[in-house]
Image (cartoon, grey):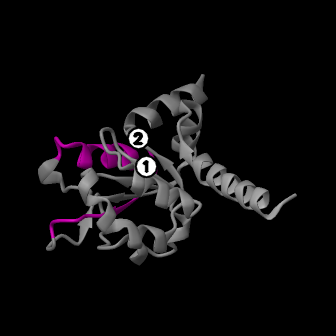
Amino acid sequence: MSAATRAVTRSCTKEARWMANIVHDKAEALAIARKAKRVAVLGIKTEEKKNQPAFYVPEYLHSVGVQVVPVPVYFPEVTSILGEKVFRKVADVPSPNTIDILDVFRRPQDLRAHLPDILQAAPKCVWLQSGISDPDFEREVAEAGIKVVVSRCLLVDHQEATQQSNL
């Protein structure tokens, strides 16, 4: 095999590896949601914003026994949300590599600012809520070996996944 052929093969293999970390399959997303025991929520809101998804999605998860780790972007005076201690960076969460899902409530244009923190924390999966997508951000996270679910609602998928497992 020529050097050029080996280089192309390595390049294709590397691309296939990171692409495999982008979750397109609904069944795979549901499995991730169902297995999650610890979910950090980047951009979580407080109870004062209880009608917004950034509060009621983690509130639902908390209500069904999932450990929710709040990582708000705003609300500097807040020290706890849903009875859990607030962290200002994902990497500051104790044992960040045990985060099953980092549920992200940030606008697409704000994602890149969080990339170094997310890569340092290395959660098992980054879940971008409905309507949130940035292909370059997704690729960088996936290249780091982290699963990425794009533009899906964790509440809806968790409910569906747990209903299916109860049938």
What is the residue that sits farthest to the right in this orientation?
Answer: 1
Which comes sooner in the sequence, label 2 or label 1?
1
The residue positioned 54% from the left and 42% from the top of the image is: 23
The residue indicated by pointer 1 is 127
Which quadrant holds residue 91?
A: bottom left
**Residues marked 2 and 1 touching at CB (< 8 Å):** yes
Query: Residue 146, percent across and down?
Result: 55, 58
Which corner quadrant of the image does residue 28 belong to? top right
Mark 1 Cα-neighbour bin, 10 Å: few <14, some 14–19, many ≥20: many
Left or right side of 13 for 56: left
Neighbours of disc 2 within 10 Å: few (<14), some (14-19), many (20+)? many
Q: Position of residue 50 (x, y in %)?
A: 17, 46
Residue at image mark 2: 154
100 or 22: which is nearer to us?
A: 22
**Amino acid type at image mark 2:** Leu
Q: Is residue 150 visible?
A: yes
Q: Residue at x 25, y 59 (%)?
A: 110
Which segment did they paint magenta?
50-75
**Residue furthest top in the image:** 167
Q: Is residue 55 left or right of residue 160?
A: left
Q: Quadrant of the N terminus?
A: bottom right
Instruction: Give the residue drawn at x 34%, y 73%.
Output: 89
Find out whether residue 64 is within the magenta segment: yes
Image coordinates for residue 95, horizontal then vertical, percent? 52, 74
Q: State the residue in front, 134 or 146.
A: 134
Asked if residue 29 lies left or right of residue 154, the reply is right
